């Protein structure tokens, strides 16, 4: 008889400091066999479906809700999801399944459920027939993992790379561990520890400290201590929840004392690294001074405070204004502004118009820029990832929808205007619109780390700049109310 595995997903990174709430309409919903359409799209769900085929499993499909990172959610979003999931999962439990496999983010929050994934896992565990079933869940590296999540999941399997080039492979790895669990019939336990350290998103890249040495230590400890999985999640600092922060957990058959020793080793290393770490950001004017002196192109201005991948609106005007005031060279910026696209949609290529651009999504911005532009082209904003392991694939697969888009110019500045905030994690965003980013001299990038896999190989210099915004790296400036204290660096 075939092994039956129930599959479902819930994916949203909730920035609780963003002004605009996220409506239920922002979620893409797939039900039943619609989940199977992910096969071949390079997402984590594709990774699981491909692995399931290899193991000869029968996949019992549930429901998948997913939306791009954005602002706060109402409880009704989660309750609607749970009502649908409970119905399909209860039916599957009654018919008989061998395991539950979930593709989650791990940093979803609503008004009253600041730990949505923990609440979800607890509710699933409480269903008749699910009390002892293996529950394996894939998590984004930026999950704010909680004790409740660790308690109710058999295994939490996180991405290990940031940018998330291993998202699909993580689901394959999780499926492999589930197969091993079902085959060897060994009882796994998850042991959890919160570090009480808060990391700004630019400090969560895995190519440097503190994450690189922590990941290296974890892989070594897996081998020497015989654990199945050691999870590390730096967390998502722009979610105001009790569980926000850097966490560790061990999935293992080893005795509790061995698991705790592993956690303590990681904890000590993390405290040491955090005390030494200083990410540092440039003043925007200083960065432009340096670019003008160096003349090393393309140069990129990275703006974490308007990080689209962290839920920011993607329409901040600080870099736009700076490049208008100092046209050092041919530059490119992308701005999310559906209203501006709507105005431009009535024009033809070559037409000129004055538009009110950007500055609408955050009270921290100076407001829209009134700018005369020349329309170059209008497009549907759909593009295929040039890099199938792009950070974007972890969120949306390999086909990306920016919504109706427009390319305009003003002097030496080329502006890509989108209708849907689209994280700048793949060069296809530019090339699909007829723009070669390699020929630009300065590029504005609204990101923290996720852009690096695509942009680092083509750029000569990078300047991470400090601007106001809902994804500010200055954690002291954020109005935390629900975060459990004390926590470093807010409380030294």
Image: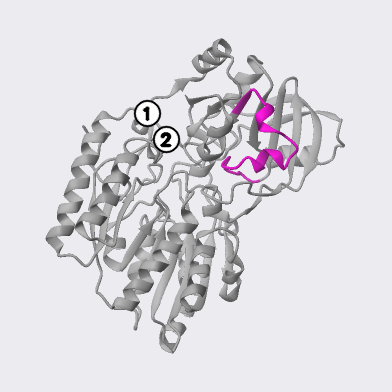
Relative placement, left or right, of 470 versus 340 is left
Residue reaching furthest to the front: 224
- Decide whether the magenta segment is chiefly helix, strand or loop: loop
Q: Is residue 381 one of those drawn in magenta?
A: no
Q: Is mark 2 on a helix, strand or loop?
A: helix
Nearest to the observer: residue 60 or residue 215: 215
Residue 466 appears anywhere in the view: no
Quarter of the figure that contains the C terminus? top left
Q: Does residue 455 appear anywhere in the picture?
A: yes
> Is 178 left, or right, of 255 in this rendering?
right
Task: Write down the residue under mark 1.
Answer: 279
Task: Using the image, determine if residue 16 lies above or below residue 183.
Answer: above
Quadrant assignment, res 490: top left
Q: Give the range drawn in magenta.
A: 420-443
Locate residue 408, reporting x and y percent.
76, 31
Q: Which mark is residue 478?
A: none
Instruction: Determine crowd level at label 1: few under 14, some 14-19, many 20+ residues with C-alpha closer than 10 A.
Output: few
Q: In which quarter of the image is residue 436?
A: top right
Residue shown at the point (25%, 35%) measured from the top left: 273
Q: Are marks 2 and 1 in contact (CB under 8 Å)?
A: yes
* Location of residue 379 in the rendering, given as x and y in whole percent from the top left corner: 77, 44
Number of the label disc, if any, that sits on residue 202? 2
């Amino acid at each position: 008889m075939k092994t039956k595995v129930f599959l479902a997903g819930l994916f949203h990174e909730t920035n609780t400091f963003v002004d605009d709430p996220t409506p239920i309409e922002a979620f893409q919903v797939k039900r039943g066999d619609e989940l199977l359409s992910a096969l071949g799209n390079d997402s984590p769900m594709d990774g699981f479906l491909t692995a399931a085929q290899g193991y000869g499993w029968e996949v019992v499909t549930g429901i998948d809700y997913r939306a791009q990172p954005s602002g706060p959610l109402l409880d009704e979003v989660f309750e609607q999801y749970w009502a649908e999931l409970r119905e399909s999962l209860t039916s599957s439990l009654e018919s008989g399944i061998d395991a539950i496999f979930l593709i989650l983010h791990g940093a979803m929050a609503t008004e009253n459920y600041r730990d949505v994934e923990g609440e979800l896992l607890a509710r699933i565990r409480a269903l008749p027939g699910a009390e002892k079933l293996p529950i394996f869940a894939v998590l984004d590296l930026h999950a704010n993992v909680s004790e409740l999540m660790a308690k109710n999941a058999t295994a939490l399997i996180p991405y290990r790379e940031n940018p998330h080039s291993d998202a699909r492979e993580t689901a394959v790895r999780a499926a492999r561990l589930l197969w091993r669990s079902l085959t060897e019939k060994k009882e796994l336990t998850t042991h959890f520890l919160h570090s009480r350290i808060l990391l700004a998103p630019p400090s969560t890249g895995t190519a440097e400290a503190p994450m690189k040495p922590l990941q290296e230590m974890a892989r070594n400890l897996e081998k020497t201590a015989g654990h199945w999985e050691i999870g590390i999640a730096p967390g998502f600092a722009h979610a105001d929840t009790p569980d926000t922060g850097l966490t560790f957990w061990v999935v293992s058959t080893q005795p509790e004392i061995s698991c705790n020793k592993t956690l303590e080793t990681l904890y000590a290393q993390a405290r040491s690294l955090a005390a030494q770490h200083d990410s540092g950001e440039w003043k925007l004017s200083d960065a432009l001074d340096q670019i003008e002196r160096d003349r090393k192109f393309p140069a990129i201005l990275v703006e974490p405070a308007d990080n689209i991948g962290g839920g920011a609106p993607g329409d901040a005007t600080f870099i736009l204004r700076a490049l208008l005031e100092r046209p050092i060279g041919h530059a490119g910026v992308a701005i999310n502004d559906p209203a501006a696209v709507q105005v431009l949609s009535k024009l033809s290529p070559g037409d000129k118009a004055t538009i009110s651009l950007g500055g609408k999504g955050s009270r921290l911005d100076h407001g829209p820029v009134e700018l005369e532009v020349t329309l170059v082209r209008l497009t549907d904003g759909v593009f295929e990832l040039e890099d199938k392991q792009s950070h974007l694939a972890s969120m949306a697969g390999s086909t990306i929808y920016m919504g109706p888009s427009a390319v305009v110019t003003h002097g030496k500045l080329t502006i890509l205007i989108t209708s849907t905030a689209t994280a700048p994690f793949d060069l296809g965003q530019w090339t699909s619109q007829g723009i070669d980013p390699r020929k630009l001299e300065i590029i504005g990038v609204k990101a923290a780390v996720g852009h690096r896999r695509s942009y680092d190989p083509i750029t000569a210099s990078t300047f991470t700049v400090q601007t106001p915004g809902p994804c500010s790296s200055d954690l002291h400036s954020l109005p935390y109310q629900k975060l459990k204290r004390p926590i470093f660096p807010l409380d030294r």
